[in-house]
C-alpha cells in the first residue's frame, strides 16, 4: 500500500542554480540524472533544474495512463524522432489534457531569456536534453525575471510553473500601489481567500481586483519575499516572522527607493494563514504620485470589510452615558484603553465588543490582535498568536507592521506595560485588559510591576492611558418567582438594610424566590454587566501624581459628566427590583452608605435628605 502511494508522492526535482550542472557535491548515484550544462555563452540566460527527475513515460505509467509496454514503445519511437515524447503520446491514447497533467507532474521547466529563445545555441542544448529523455517545457522570460527566478531558486530550491506569473503580479501590484501614491501594501492570507489592501493618505482600501484564493496569496507573499526582495535575513520560512527589502533598482519607473517587507504567520496558522506588510519608500515627496484615477479604477478600491452586527454594550447592561463615554474613546487615534476586572468579570468579551465596534466605525484602520490563543476569529484584522509571556516582544514587532490599533490580550507584567505605553506614545490605540478589581487600581498595579519604568509620573499621562473600563457580571432575578423584600422568608442582614435605606425607597426591592419552571428552579434569569467607564483627564492624572490614587478617584467621581462606581449602578438595579442585594454584594462590592461614595453632581442632586 505504502509502496504504491510512494510512486505518486514523489519529491520535486531538486533545483539549485548555484550548483547547476557542476555536480561537485552530488552523490555518484545521482550523477547519471544530472542535467548537462548549457554552453558557457548560454548559461547566464537560462534557469533550469539541476537534475532530470522521473521521465515523462514513467510518470504516465505511475498515473495509470500507459502500460509499461506502451511506455517502452513510446520511448523507442520518440528516440527516432528527436525525443518529442509529449507530441507522440496522443498516438498512445493520451488526451492533450492528460499530456498536460503528466508535464505538470514532471515540472521540468526551462526558463530562457526571450532574446536567446530559438537561437541555434539554445535549440542544440534543448535537443541534447531531449536525447537524454527529458521533456522540457520552455518558457520565455525577461532578463529581470530570470534574475528574480535565480534568487527564488536559491532560496526555495524549487520551481513552480506559475512563479513567473506570480512575480509579474507582485511587481505590478507594487507599481500600481505607487501609481496611486500608496504608502503601504497589506496582503492578508485567510483560511479560504486572500485580501490585498493598500493605504492611501492614511486610509486602508481593499483592492477588489486582486481578491484571490488562499494559495495564490501564499504564492504572492512568497514571491515578493523570495523573488523580488534582494535583502533578507533568511530563506522564506512560512512560520517565522521575517524582514526583507526590495531595492529601488528592482522597481524601475515607480519612484520608489525601496520597499520594506515584514511577513509572518497569522490566524488561522494551521490553515496556512499569514500576512505580508510592504512599506513603500518614495525617492522624494514629488515622486509620491497624487494618484492616477485610471489605476485606482482598475484596482477597484473599496472600503475594507467591517464586522457584522451592532454594538452590544447597551444590550449587555451598559448605561447610555457609559456607551457614550466608550464611543468617545473609540474615536481617539491613540492611547491605551484598559478593561479591568477579575477572572469571570467578562472583561474579554467587552474588549472584543469595543474593538469590533471601533472597526465598524473606522473600517479604514488596520487592526492587529495579539492573543494567547485567538479568542474570536476576526477576518477584518491581522490576528497574531503568541505565548502571553512574549506579548511585549510581539507588540514591539507589530509596530513595524503599520497598525492603527493593536489589541493586546492582557498586560501581565512590566514589559507588557511598558510596550503598551510605547505603542500608545507612537500613535496607536491599544485596547487591552488588566487583572484588578477597581479601575483606579490600574495605576498602583502598573507601578507595582516596576516602580521605575512604570512610575506614576510616567503612567499618569492622559494621552497614554485614555480610558479605563471596569466591569462585573451580575445574575438577574427571575421576574416570575422573585419576591418583594418585605415578603422574603429570610431577612437581609441589618447592616445591609441600613446601607440600602440611605439610597432611597426600598419598596421596589426584590430578592430571590424559591425558583419556578421559567428559571428551572434557579430563581435567576440571565445576567448582565455592571460597569464604570473612566475617561482620563489631565486633572485626574495630576491628582494621581500629587495626591495619590484615592484622592484622584474621589475628585474624578465628583466631576460633572463622570460615571458612577459599579456598586452605584448595581444599587440602581437593586432598587428597581431586578437584582438581589445579596448578589450585588457578592459579585460587585459591599453595599456602602450613600455618603461614603463619591458621585458626580447630577447624581448627588437627586439625594433625598
Ligand atoms: Zn478613514
Ligand atoms: Zn423563576
Image (cartoon, rainbow, N blue to C red):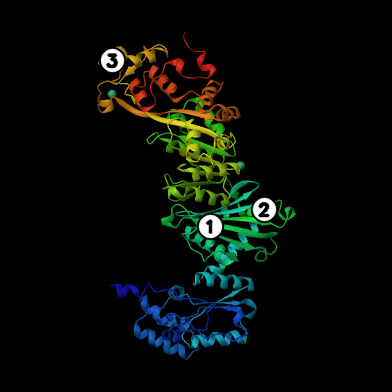
> Residue sitting at 42 percent across and 80 percent down?
54
Q: Residue furthest top?
A: 609
Q: Are marks 3 and 1 in contact (CB under 8 Å)?
A: no
Q: Residue furthest bottom?
A: 80
How many marks can you see?
3
Q: Describe the element under mark 3 as helix, strand or loop.
A: loop
Residue on which the image places disc 1: 263
Between marks 2 and 1, how big is the CA–CA gap?
A: 23 Å
Q: Quadrant of ligand 2?
A: top left
Q: Is residue 237 above or below residue 595?
A: below
Q: Residue furthest front?
A: 452
- Tell me the tag on residue 105: none
Q: Left of 111 or right of it: where is 391?
A: left
Between marks 3 and 2, how big is the CA–CA gap?
A: 73 Å
Of labels 2 and 1, the one closer to you: 1
Q: Are marks 3 and 2 in contact (CB under 8 Å)?
A: no
Amino acid at each position: 500500500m505504502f509502496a504504491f502511494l510512494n510512486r505518486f508522492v514523489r519529491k520535486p526535482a531538486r533545483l539549485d542554480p548555484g550548483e547547476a550542472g557542476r555536480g561537485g557535491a552530488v552523490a555518484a548515484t545521482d550523477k547519471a540524472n544530472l542535467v548537462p550544462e548549457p554552453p558557457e555563452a548560454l548559461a547566464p540566460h537560462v534557469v533550469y533544474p539541476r537534475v532530470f527527475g522521473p521521465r515523462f513515460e514513467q510518470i504516465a505509467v505511475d498515473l495509470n495512463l500507459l502500460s509499461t509496454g506502451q511506455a517502452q514503445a513510446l520511448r523507442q519511437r520518440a528516440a527516432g524522432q528527436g525525443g518529442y515524447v509529449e507530441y507522440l503520446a496522443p498516438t498512445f491514447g493520451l488526451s492533450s489534457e492528460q499530456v498536460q497533467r503528466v508535464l505538470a507532474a514532471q515540472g521540468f521547466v526551462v526558463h530562457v531569456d526571450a532574446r536567446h529563445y530559438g537561437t541555434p545555441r539554445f535549440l542544440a542544448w534543448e535537443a541534447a536534453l531531449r536525447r537524454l529523455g527529458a521533456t522540457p517545457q520552455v518558457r520565455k522570460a525577461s532578463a529581470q525575471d530570470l534574475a528574480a527566478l535565480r534568487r527564488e531558486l536559491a532560496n526555495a530550491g524549487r520551481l513552480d510553473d506559475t512563479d513567473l506569473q506570480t512575480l509579474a503580479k507582485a511587481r505590478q501590484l507594487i507599481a500600481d500601489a505607487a501609481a496611486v501614491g500608496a504608502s503601504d501594501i497589506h496582503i492578508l492570507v485567510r483560511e479560504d481567500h486572500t485580501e490585498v489592501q493598500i493605504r492611501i493618505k492614511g486610509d486602508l482600501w481593499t483592492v477588489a481586483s486582486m481578491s484571490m484564493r488562499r494559495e495564490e496569496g501564499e504564492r504572492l507573499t512568497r514571491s515578493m519575499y523570495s523573488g523580488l526582495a534582494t535583502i533578507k535575513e533568511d530563506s522564506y520560512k512560512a512560520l517565522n516572522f521575517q524582514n526583507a527589502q526590495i531595492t529601488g533598482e528592482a522597481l524601475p519607473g515607480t519612484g520608489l527607493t525601496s520597499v520594506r517587507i515584514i511577513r509572518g504567520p497569522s490566524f488561522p496558522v494551521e490553515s496556512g494563514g499569514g500576512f505580508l506588510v510592504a512599506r513603500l519608500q518614495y525617492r522624494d515627496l514629488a515622486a509620491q504620485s497624487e494618484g492616477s484615477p485610471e489605476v485606482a479604477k482598475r484596482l477597484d478600491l473599496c472600503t475594507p470589510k467591517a464586522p457584522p452586527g451592532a454594538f452590544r454594550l447597551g444590550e449587555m447592561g451598559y448605561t447610555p452615558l457609559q456607551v457614550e463615554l466608550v464611543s468617545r474613546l473609540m474615536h481617539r487615534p491613540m492611547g491605551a484603553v484598559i478593561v479591568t476586572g477579575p477572572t469571570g468579570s467578562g472583561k474579554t468579551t467587552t474588549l472584543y465588543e469595543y474593538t469590533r465596534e471601533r472597526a465598524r466605525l473606522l473600517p479604514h484602520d488596520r487592526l492587529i490582535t495579539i492573543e494567547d490563543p485567538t479568542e474570536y476569529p476576526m477576518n477584518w484584522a491581522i490576528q497574531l498568536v503568541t505565548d502571553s509571556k512574549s506579548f511585549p516582544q510581539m507588540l514591539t514587532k507589530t509596530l513595524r507592521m503599520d497598525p492603527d490599533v493593536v489589541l493586546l490580550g492582557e498586560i501581565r507584567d512590566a514589559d507588557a506595560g511598558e510596550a503598551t505605553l510605547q505603542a500608545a506614545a507612537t500613535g496607536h490605540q491599544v485596547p487591552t485588559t488588566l487583572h484588578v478589581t477597581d479601575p483606579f487600581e490600574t495605576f498602583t498595579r502598573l507601578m507595582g510591576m516596576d516602580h521605575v519604568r512604570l512610575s506614576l509620573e510616567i503612567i499618569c499621562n492622559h494621552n497614554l492611558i485614555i480610558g479605563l473600563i471596569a466591569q462585573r457580571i451580575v445574575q438577574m432575578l427571575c421576574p416570575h418567582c422573585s419576591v418583594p423584600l418585605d415578603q422574603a422568608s429570610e431577612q437581609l442582614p441589618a447592616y445591609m438594610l441600613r446601607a440600602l435605606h440611605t439610597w432611597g425607597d426600598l419598596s421596589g426591592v426584590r430578592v430571590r424566590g424559591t425558583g419556578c419552571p421559567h428559571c428551572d428552579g434557579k430563581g435567576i434569569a440571565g445576567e448582565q454587566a455592571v460597569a464604570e467607564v473612566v475617561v482620563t483627564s489631565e486633572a485626574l492624572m495630576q491628582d494621581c501624581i500629587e495626591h495619590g490614587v484615592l484622592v484622584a478617584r474621589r475628585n474624578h467621581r465628583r466631576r460633572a459628566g463622570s460615571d458612577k462606581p459599579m456598586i452605584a449602578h448595581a444599587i440602581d438595579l437593586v432598587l428597581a427590583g431586578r437584582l438581589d442585594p445579596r448578589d450585588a454584594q457578592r459579585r460587585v462590592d459591599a453595599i456602602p452608605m450613600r455618603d461614603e461614595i463619591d458621585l458626580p453632581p447630577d447624581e448627588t442632586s437627586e439625594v433625598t435628605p
